[in-house]
Image (cartoon, rainbow, N blue to C red):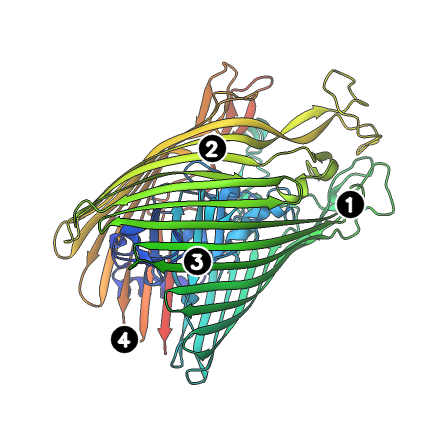
Amino acid sequence: MQHKKRVPGRLAYAAILVASAQAVFAQQADSVKQLDSVVVTASGFEQMIKDAPASISVITREELEKKPFNNVADAVADIEGVSVERGGKTGGMNISIRGMGSDYTLILVDGKRVNRNGSGARPNGFGDVDTSFIPPVSAIERIEVVRGPMSTLYGSDAMGGVINIITRKVAKEWGGSITADGTVQLNDTFGNGYGSSFYLSGPIKEDMLGVSIYGRYDRKMAAHEMYPASAAEAASGNYTGNVSGDGYTGSKMQNLGVRFALTPNQNHDLLLDLEQGRQRYDNSTGQLGTLNSEVAPNAAGGGYDPEQRYDRSRYALTHLGRYGNLSSDSSILYETTETIGRTNPMSRPRKPIDGTPRTLEYDNLVLDSKWNLSLLDDTHNLTFGGQWREQKFVNSLAEAPLDLKQWQWALYLENEWRVVDDFAITLGARYDRNEQFGGNWSPRAYAVWNASPNWTVKGGVSRGYKTPDLNVMTDGIIGLRGQGTIPEVGSASLVPEKSVSSEIGVYFDDLQGSKANITLFHTAFKDKLNTNNVPNCRANNVPGCLDLGDWRRNGAPVDNFVVWENVDEATIRGVELGGALPLTEALTFSGNYTFTDAKRDSGANMGAPLNSEARHRLNMRLDWRINTQASAWLRAEYRAKQYARINAEGKQDFYNPYWLFGVGGSYQLTKTISINASVENLLNKKFVDYGRYSTTGNPGWGNAYYKNLEGRRLWVSANMTF
């Protein structure tokens, strides 16, 4: 049954705003690829992008303010080498870099790691909420994106790359901003949304103590796009499939933070950061997970309340020191994340514990100290330091409770040696010591040659390292899948995943606005963690079966266990192209293309793609600077060759390719008020196309596109500074 939804009266008002806005964005090339921007993530100290020992991009706050921005993925989606895909549960975004999955992308805020799904606190595909736990745009100074492993400086989880969100310093004079934005769906089967944010900063005591306060609230309505969930439904026209269960359920999000900055003298700063975030998602009809009340009396499953909630609290104390040619950045970080709304699933036969609240909580304590020393007339820049990390995970699943702890420490040293003015070599190594896995070395070597004012050549090799997540490193049952019906099994014999990556890139800048770059990259990946279905010996006593006792979910022993194993090796290679070309003084064309070939070299699926990332990704943009007050842009993106499955003939199937277009603009109404607007999915491309597909056994049923994406929609934002 189709549900009709009233289009709000503010649609007309939004249209007026678009007409008055006339246009958008400062040039993409200026904000994302400036070779004269200063960055810190690649080496741990400030340097120009062209000198940084890594492939790195920068997105400024001004750029972020002029497009829809609900999470960090919205900011980095247009960067070469970066793949952003919508999650299938809450609709949050997953970010992967150079063919590595989202679990291999380390997200930092001011150089401090952000908890992610691998902690186990958000199991069963709900980790896409992580990318929304960030400060609002008004509190962000810039975002730096490093493509390629950075395990030497940042340790585990940085195998694919690093995204560092750098927030604004506390202001010396009082000021701030207020922003309100909204999205109106022009296809009324998807839900509208709106949000607001604020930022306030200034001194409490001049040149001594200051404070910054920020907050963000977002509300998203549920979608009502229906589709046939089976061939029978397609024939009858009576559809029960609803995209609200594919990441479009109703939601509310809020983030609030405060920073106190104490400067006792010119050589020392003390920063105290306090942040809290909360996300709520509607599960009243079981769109995210089966409600206990929906489980039949003679069946097992469920494990979900009508509302799913995800909380995060983050506290950090940082000391910044300056001692001539020596500087330091030392911090203590405590972060806790919790899932609320999960329960112990229903058993067959029923047990007293069924339906009771389930604790899912992850705590992370990190002590970090990073130092930089400049020697011999700045020809040597040493970055060195250490880190202590302690993790704790609690899962009160009645049939498999977990209360785990683990410590890990690391020491690292990296030296940038400027051999001559135009040529520098960076050599570094990190030693990690893990309570369970022992020691590991992660070295890297990188060279940067500024061949001329217009040409730069970069290249290097590095080793990536990632320990298994805390929740999977325990023998026996660690959780349930299949809506509470299939046991998930961990293993204490798992080993860390490792990679060796290399890249070489050439950059051109005529210093008049024309820019181009090409980078080739290659990664050899081994000991990849994956899951495998293993028969239960008590249900099917065959060679290779697993006996974990009398494990029953539906009155009889379960047929299979989902077991974590180190099974796969893989090779990832590709090319990144980017450039910008001024067509006139007012018009600039920019774009980038990424080709990624990621294949498994071992295991049951040898030769198959490593994941479902698009092999071809193209982004193009035309920016028009109308005058000092107004600008406009036209954007296009293309995605193709996203792996779906092996079909009945043993060949690879791929999801449908697609183009997406967008148009928008910005207008500075007054010195303090600006309007930004855009129309996304300009041609109203449809992504709901369900039908049969070929596979081994019975024919399958699913969408011809990788994800259900929203149709044409209008976004408007108004910002006032003071």
Contact (Cβ within 8 Å) of mark 2 with mark 4 = no
What is the number of the mark on residue 165? 3
Name the one closer to the observer, 343 or 531: 531
Direction from residue 477 to residue 380 in the image, left or right: left
Direction from residue 6 to residue 485 in the image, left or right: right
Mark 1: which secondary structure? loop
Query: How crowded is the residue under tag 2: few (<14 C-alpha within 10 Å), some, or many (20+)?
Result: some
Q: Which residue is mark 1?
A: 401
Q: Nearer the viewer, mark 3 or mark 2?
A: 3
Q: Residue 332: percent from the left, percent from the top? A: 57, 63
What is the number of the mark on residue 670? 4
For the residue marked with disc 1, what is the amino acid? Answer: Pro
For the residue marked with disc 3, what is the amino acid? Answer: Ile
Mark 4: which secondary structure? loop
Q: Which residue is mark 2?
A: 612
Q: CA distance from mark 3 to mark 2?
A: 27 Å
Q: CA distance from mark 3 to mark 4?
A: 29 Å
For the residue marked with disc 2, what is the amino acid? Answer: Ser
For the residue marked with disc 4, what is the amino acid? Answer: Thr
Contact (Cβ within 8 Å) of mark 1 with mark 2 = no
